[in-house]
Amino acid sequence: MRKEIFFIIVLLSITLQGVAAQARPKTWTEGLGESFSSVFDNFNYEYFINKRNLTSDNYDEKRAALIKEANEDYFTFDVPELTEKEQRANDIIQDLREQVVQGDHSPLLLPYYEGKKQISGSNLHQAIRKMPKGAHLHLHPSAAYPLDLMIQLTYKDDAYYNIKENRLSTFPNKAAVEPGFHKCNFLRKNWKFGGTFDSFLRNKILLTEDEMKSQESSEVWKGFQAKFGVIGDLFQTPENIRAGLMEICKRALNDGVYIVEFRKSLSGNFTKKLENYQYVQREMKKIDPAFEIALIVAVGKNKEAKIKSQLAVYNHVRKTYPFVTGFDLVGEEDALPSIYSFKDLILDAMNQDDDEDEPTENDFNLFFHAGETTDRYNENLYDAILLGTKRIGHGFGILLHPGLIDKVIEEDIGIEICPISNLVLAYTLDMRWHPIRTLMNRGVSVAISSDDPTFFDYDNLSLDFTYGIIAWQLDLKDLKQLALNSIKESSIHEDLKTKVYAKFYKEWENFIDTINVSA
Ligand SMILES: *[C@@H]1O[C@H](CO)[C@@H](O)[C@H](O)[C@H]1NC(C)=O
Ligand SMILES: *[C@@H]1O[C@H](CO)[C@@H](O)[C@H](O)[C@H]1NC(C)=O
Ligand SMILES: *[C@@H]1O[C@H](CO)[C@@H](O)[C@H](O)[C@H]1NC(C)=O
Ligand SMILES: [Zn+2]
């Protein structure tokens, strides 16, 4: 552009602005009408100009008021202040945390197995193993039978493996062995593919570093989903199912967990399946009278006929088997149909609930997986909440729908947070930014669960807590609230919780003493 033209344009625009300014009212609020003027007449210009009328005398007071206001919903609001002993224990735990963090957060940011090695080997984790944790609300048994037990069960005479299909199975009746299956003990003895058969199996069952290296959830899910196929049929016989469930429960009890809620379908002969849970319930009571189990009937969110029949089974058994407490739809949310697409089946089953009067604990109850996604267009959380879900499994994406956070608080819907699962399945790449931190601040009733620990090579809920302490700077008050929330949100009958709370508070005292003594 030529210099002269530029000059003329600038001159012209200055003149035009002058004309415009003359056309304006004298003060700029005048043009806004009566009501606006009065608002602005009362507007505190001094305050506005001096920002917030801050002086060095009033600053601390105003600051304290802001902090209080911004945090008054924090989820530990009803936990009493820490006692002196608890305060000391908290200091010790924070020191142990610092030993793991060491100035940076490297163990959290390393590839999963490397980081887990450091975290599970830490003194912090050893200390947290002694902490009572209340209820484990979100656990899929097929992905939670301890790995060492799985391997041990393949030493039994009825254990077979199909190399081509990568599938373990049991055939108690030799005549029924399907083609392609070989006895595990035979393969073990004649193994020629390098390493041992056991280490081969271990690698097939665990999600490998390679299978989880993608930072795209849908990629990681491909490897993950296949794991259910590998071990699924190993747990068909009552002997194996019982051994598996017992081992989960015993280890849970040893880990400070007093209620375990399983999610599993009841396909096939449901009476036979329920007998296994009854057996476990009975046997665990002998070990600890406070210990409880629950079963939430959980069906893959893809097969309409199966969903329909499992809803019918659930309605059929929930009155006669009080530990069957709810219904759920599971699977990869970003890949499977929505909850909405099955709403009619659910509504039909729900409306068959014949209790007209008082709600009882054996009413039709939903415990939906929902919001295990980072997709803003995924609407499962809306349907889960509208259908009256008692808790939400994961709820990871709820931050994308802040209005739903209010609903969840209003209706006291618990959220089952599964930190390690979210990390491994790549819903978060940095645990420090897990949505739970915002949910705790808003006062949502959150609790910690594992989801599928065996595939991620661990078997203690403690490890999820330890990750949480490192990533979210949890203190002892937070830890206590998380445990208490899990009991409060548990689906077991309210009157069964009395013993659980009593045990929790007793063990909490022991835990505090142990921490203080060991330091
Ligand atoms: C500003 O702060 C001072 C000292 O706290 C107080 O006396 C005064 O009333 C405040 N003024 C306004 C306009 O709030
Ligand atoms: C889990 O707990 C068992 C005891 O029940 C313990 O032997 C094991 O080392 C723990 N695992 C981890 C990863 O801490
Ligand atoms: C289902 O299992 C129960 C208990 O084990 C058994 O009594 C019943 O006969 C079975 N039903 C069928 C159809 O196999
Ligand atoms: Zn799950």
Image (cartoon, helix red, strand yellow):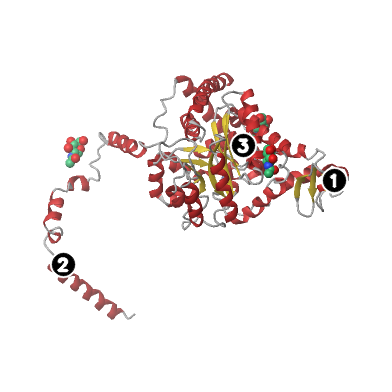
Disc 1 marks which amino acid? Leu
Kindly identify which residue carries mark 3.
119
- Residue closer to the observer: 383 or 202: 383
Q: What mark, if any, has residue 21 been given in the picture?
A: 2
Q: Residues within 10 Å of mark 1 (few under 14, many from 20)?
A: some
Q: CA distance from mark 1 to mark 2?
A: 92 Å
Question: From the viewer's perspective, is the residue at label 3 or at label 2 nearer?
Answer: 3
Q: What mark, if any, has residue 402 been given in the picture?
A: none
Kindly identify which residue carries mark 1.
187
Q: Judge whether 486 appears above or below 268 on screen.
A: above
Q: Are marks 3 and 2 in contact (CB under 8 Å)?
A: no
Q: CA distance from mark 3 to mark 2?
A: 67 Å
Q: Residues within 10 Å of mark 3 (few under 14, many from 20)?
A: many
On-image quarter of the N terminus? bottom left
Q: Choose top left, top right, bottom left or bottom right for residue 235.
A: top right
Picture coordinates of residue 32 (x, y %)? Answer: 15, 60
- Residue closer to the observer: 70 or 347: 347
